Amino acid sequence: MELDRVDAALVRELQADGRLPFETLAQRVGLSRAAARLRVRRLLDTGALRVVGVLHPAVRDIGALAHLSIGVDGAAAPVAAAVAELPEATLVSLTSGRFPLITEVRGHDLARLTEVVDRVRGLPGVREVSTSVYTRVVKDPYLAATAPPEIAPDAVDTRLLRLLERDGRLSFAELAGHVGLSAGAVRTRVMRLLRGRAIHVTALLDPGAVGRDRHGGFAARLTGSADAAAEIAAWDDVQFLTRCLGRADLIGTVAAGSIAGLHAVYERLRALPGVRLSETWVHLAQVKERYGP
């Protein structure tokens, strides 16, 4: 499906605040409340859009993240399946390029992350593992703000967070029905969780649903100002970007409508001053993608 100007405006508003009331949404994009509600419902029903709560990494006990490029002996698919069994692996994908398999792993701290990398390295069929540790995630729809959360959620808060992870637009009355509190008490708790940065409710647009169903990645070295990272993150084609330590200064994910479209993004990166593109790949098959509960 294609998003028109009004749909795109609705998505932008919901990406900034996924719990905006329909009346506020309508005012901001110049629609009636009913029309805004109808358009958002259409996007949700077609699967083009999801509104979810994204927990702060600290709430998940995540303090360290890394990208692993994996070389294998023999077929890559069985190795990918074994990596996907690891609970610390949030993304596992079969790819073209120098390495046939990539994964993203997460841990409590660098020591735990090292243990995970060692476990991956010890799996049957793994020949080599090239590790890039994230130092600053520049763009990622699945990660909340990096500033530490200001509150420590209690047991009821945790139940509310899990519900909002699945559906960020659940009403206070619906949430109250799940946790056995009044809607007013739930509203107070949810607003405290939002203000305290324990969770951010945002809209996730499925690239495939809007014609960008080819995905690729890149690794790059910075030869000039680090401002290039902010410029790249602003590109609509770039879905994810992080600063790293290791074989790359930047690792990113891009989405396009075709292989030619991916190539165009890579060419644009190659032409960018201060950036040396060192590696590119195309995602051939996604084995695992699980960032939420």
Image: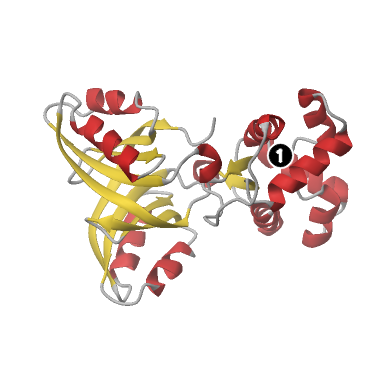
Residue 89 lies left or right of residue 35; in this view the side is left
Q: How is the image coloured?
A: secondary structure
The C terminus is located in which quarter? top right
Q: Is residue 247 above or below residue 77?
A: below
What residue is drawn where x is 63% and y is 31%?
162
Label 1 Cα neighbours within 10 Å, binned few <14 / some 14-19 / many ≥20: few
State the image coordinates of residue 174 (x, y, percent, origin top left).
Answer: 81, 29
Query: Which of the two residues, 130 or 9, is positioned nearer the viewer here?
Result: 130
Q: Quadrant of residue 78?
A: top left
Observer able to see residue 1: no
Residue 123 lies left or right of residue 110; in this view the side is left
What residue is drawn where x is 75% and y is 35%?
170
Label 1 is placed on what type of residue? Arg
Observer able to see residue 6: yes
Q: Quadrant of residue 185?
A: top right
What residue is drawn where x is 38% and y is 71%?
228
Q: How many marks?
A: 1
State the image coordinates of residue 253 (x, y, percent, origin top left).
Answer: 38, 51
Secondary structure found at label 1:
helix
State the image coordinates of residue 113 (x, y, percent, origin top left).
Answer: 32, 40
The N terminus is located in which quarter? top right
State the image coordinates of residue 287 (x, y, percent, origin top left).
Answer: 36, 29
Residue 147 lies left or right of residue 172; in this view the side is left
- Which residue was labeled with disc 1? 42
Query: Which of the two residues, 59 or 269, is positioned nearer the viewer here?
Result: 59
What residue is drawn where x is 26% and y is 58%?
248
Residue 147 lies left or right of residue 245; in this view the side is right
